[in-house]
Image: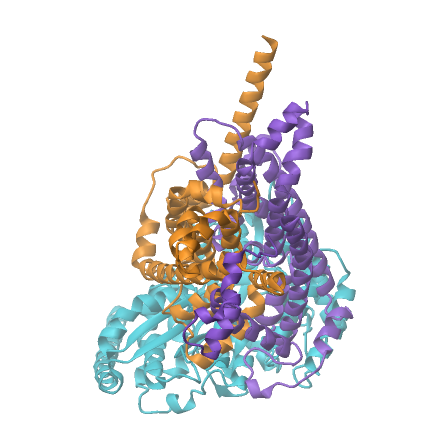
Amino acid sequence: MCSSRSKLIKRSTVGIAITLISIAAVFPLFWMLLVSLKTRVLTYDPSIWLFKPTLENYVTVFRERQLVRFMRNSGIVVIATTTLSLVLGSMAAYGFARFSFRRKEDLAFWILSLRMLPPMATVIPFFVLARFTGLLDTHLILVLAYMTFNIPFSIWMMRGFFEEIPREIEEAALVDGCSHWQVLVRVLLPLALPGLTATAIFCVIQSWNEFAFALFLTGVNARTLPTTVTFFLSVTGVIWGEMAAVGVVTALPVLVFAALVQRYMVRGLSFGAIKG
Amino acid sequence: MKRSLAIGVLAALILALSSVAFASTQSLQDWASKIKAECGGTTITVAFASHPSTEAFKRMTPEFERLTGIKVNWDVMEETYLKNKQLMDFTGSSRLYDVLMVDGFWMSEYAPKKVVAPLKPFLEGASTPGWFDYDDIVPAYRNGIGAYKGVVYGIPTAGETRFVGYRKDLFDKYGKTPPKTMAEMLELARFFNGKEPGLYGIAMRAQRGIHFASGWMTLMYNFGGGFLDQETWKPTMTDPKTVESLKFFVDLLKNAPPDVTTYTHEEAVSAFMAGKTAMWFDATALVPWITDPSKSKVHNKVGFVPPPTGPGGEAGALAGWNMSIAANSRHKDAAWAFIVYMTSRLKAKDYVMNGGVPTRTSVYEDPELVAKNPSYPVQLKALAAADALVSRGVAWIPPTPKLGKVLDRVGYYGNRALMGEISPEEACQKAQAELEDIMK
Amino acid sequence: MESFHSPLFSRRGFQPTAMNERTPVRSWLSRNPHWAYILPSVIVLVLLTVLPTVFLYYVSTTDYELGQFWNEHHRVGLENFARLFSGRDTEFWPSVRISLLFTVLATAIEFICGFGVAILLNRDFRWKSLVFACLMVPITITPSIVGQMWKLMYNAEYGVINFVVGSLFHAKVVWLGPQLAFTSTLLVDIWQWTPFLALIIYAGLRALPAEPYEAALVDGATAVQSFRYVTLPLLRPLLTLAVLFRSMDSLKLFDVPFVLTQGGPGSATELLSLHVYRLGFAQTGWVARASATAVVLLFLIVLLSQMLVRQIRREVDA
């Protein structure tokens, strides 16, 4: 009796805690949605939660701010950089996971440390580099810039996943006459698919949301979604409604993608760092 | 008799107006077809700040594109990014931009670095029609924000000076009159601070860095102070007048909302519009907001007066935006055509009606526009005060290529004084030391 | 696993005759098979990061300014660094302190809270995938935009947070004022990244093998004991990795504080990366001084990550 009651209390406490945490996590998105549906005057009154929504802000951002163009730019850059990083990263990860060589850990560490490069440190050299190669304001320069953090991340993640896979499977394939390359493509990658998906989603998130490089390396043609935030900081104040509308539109694709591959993402998050 | 005279004058006026209009449309057509023949099919890219005037120009663009066959690509962003990108475009010779929107504060840096092209050849060239009318632009703007060392680099498009807005209802209620001197303003700010629940004395911009420096400059010259001696370019931060102006600014802002240390012009005007402060001392360009019923709680309760005089006499701010041609531009003629069309006298009224900020005498004196914007006469008075400063041989924005650095450092120490971390005297001394290093 | 002497793998190395055509590249590759996989990434990374970094070092020893022609710069040796370390740049040391404090606090708090949330999640309940979807919101949402949203929510006058605080406690908090700006920025970071750590740790908890627990149960261990002696040691490599990622990311954090406070008020939230931005870009255009600061930031990051990475490799290889 007593224990069942304390169990009930415990369960409801846990339930309440989880609910509160979830609400806290979602609240800024919720508020952004609310603001995006408000007229400008209502933005400055936080006491109003129920109102007749207007789609005015969405219409404006699509019609006058060329949002579709920025979405296309973001999409091209993200898909290209993620694909390239996954291909190169998986190959290198395999090299690290399955071969032993001198100074391997030093090399691995060096690669990981590249992910830590602060964008503020590399933006100026990148700008000059882009200028000499004529790549300024192209999708390619962003694809390259994002590879500086996506490749190291992919290598690090995929290495963990490959090391998780028992060697016996692979050795069997090698005995059957497969080359290392075939082993990687036909055996390891399918087995590491959850990890690959998790790596992909993180590459997508990081590139989709990147701000500093996009701001300094693009002008008109290759501008991506996150930098559109600067449209709305005007001399006469922030245009909150439109900014929120862009925020919602920007957040949605990645949110949906993340929700779809949720299971892989959570599993992949263990980075293969747990050894059973 | 009187009446017929009036009718006669009116008729003459209408005739004159329509003939002017006729003549200009004529030449607009001529001009446009000439431009179309020379530059039609060109695409120009313009780098502009998010600003009401940019919105107005954007609305005028389809017509321009139709007339001239020049396609306009807009790159619009917040002003700090804008400066970065313009400079990076220049440094990197990426030649993305043709027309730049240039803050008057940047002109003294852009001109010597040759980021922007001198406009004299264009102004005197055949491609500039009569209806452009450069001389119609308020002289203070032409010389104060569009030129560097007497050479024209920009056409002023959005001018601002600064003046005081006050709450008529509160001033009437307590039997006060708007301030004429700095001392009165401080007294009034103290009087109204806390007089009613949630009411503060005054709102101004005071965020660390360039904003604080800019807010301080709003009243510094009225004390006779200055950051730099504009002849020798030696820092004058420890000049007693400069120190006194900082002390005054800090004292004044003790009667501002407690988070004033984070205010830019935006937060300052928002506080005033929300009815939180009795006074506001900032840019004339923001007035349309204050008087807009959909944005402002005090839209019908405000009056405006020119900047109060101080121990150093009369002085007024002079700032604003220009359109300039990027020195790197590949399409300078098309760029100039864009500038001519957008900033001409012919289109000035259109521009203001679309939300633009005036720089032309013809606009300030246009009866229809004055009826809509009662603050125009006060703005002209404030501009006269700005002229007074010019006649003292002092430019409100000190024309030095190192201005950005100077303002950043001055605004850093000033803001610390406002937060009470150091005394105003100490702030001035430290700023002096850094400025000496910068200016050497 | 370190020294991997499987006969299958070394076969290639010792039987080069298996290769028919023996070009130098091929023979080198057959002696070092791993390079065939690693080299493409390494080449790309060298081009994309080493060159820029070398350039950064060079710029940090000049007096180059934004907007100058490149050939106008002068070499000034270590003058820029001398300026930083001697305190002539008055904001440098405070911003190092703020950056480190921010990193330590953010990582520690997010780690502890994340652990708590992970333990809460590590059970079966209804709506679990909905809760997970909620937790993914802060991770996936664009920081530059959500930073702006927080700025609106934090606003002392018309922000929703003060609306809630005001109606509950009749208090008004100046969130982004001098006293609280640092805490407020930290709060946003905690909001953004606690779910990330919670999910990582949760994933780790789920991946734990069952046997050690069964063994512990047999030995009569209490729940606390099995947590202390089984869970923690097994999770350690993952936890260190999580700490590594989080601490590095908070050290180089830029976009959120940039849109939220711009480093202010005063220098209350001027992290090193913001100091770099302010020196090099905002108004002053001292690109060379900014580069020197960036070099210091890089050095800090390398130092800290080296320590953590060593730790991880030791644990993984143990």
- Could you say which chain is coloured purple in the image? C
The residue under the point 40% across, 91% down is B121
Quarter occupied by the N terminus of chain B: bottom left
Q: Nearer the viewer, residue B422 or B392?
A: B422
Q: Position of residue A166 (x, y in %)?
A: 50, 47
Q: Is residue B194 above or below residue B242?
A: above
* Foreground residue among A101 and C89: A101
Residue B29 makes an appearance in the image: yes
The colour chain B appears in is cyan
| Residue C140 position in % (x across, y down) | 46, 48
**Vertical position of residue B382 compared to residue B344: above or below:** above
> Taking the image as drawn, is residue B154 in sight?
no
- Among the 4 quarters of the image, the one containing residue A79: bottom left
Q: Position of residue C48 (x, y in %)?
A: 51, 71
Percent position of residue A107, x then y: 59, 64
User: Left or right of B33: which side holds B237?
Assistant: right
Q: Is C230 situated left or right of B243 in this image?
A: left
Say which residue appears at 54% left-offset and 80% top-offset: C67
Query: In the visual, does B81 lie left or right of B412?
Result: left
Q: Is residue B206 above or below residue B222?
A: above
Chain with colour orange in the figure:
A
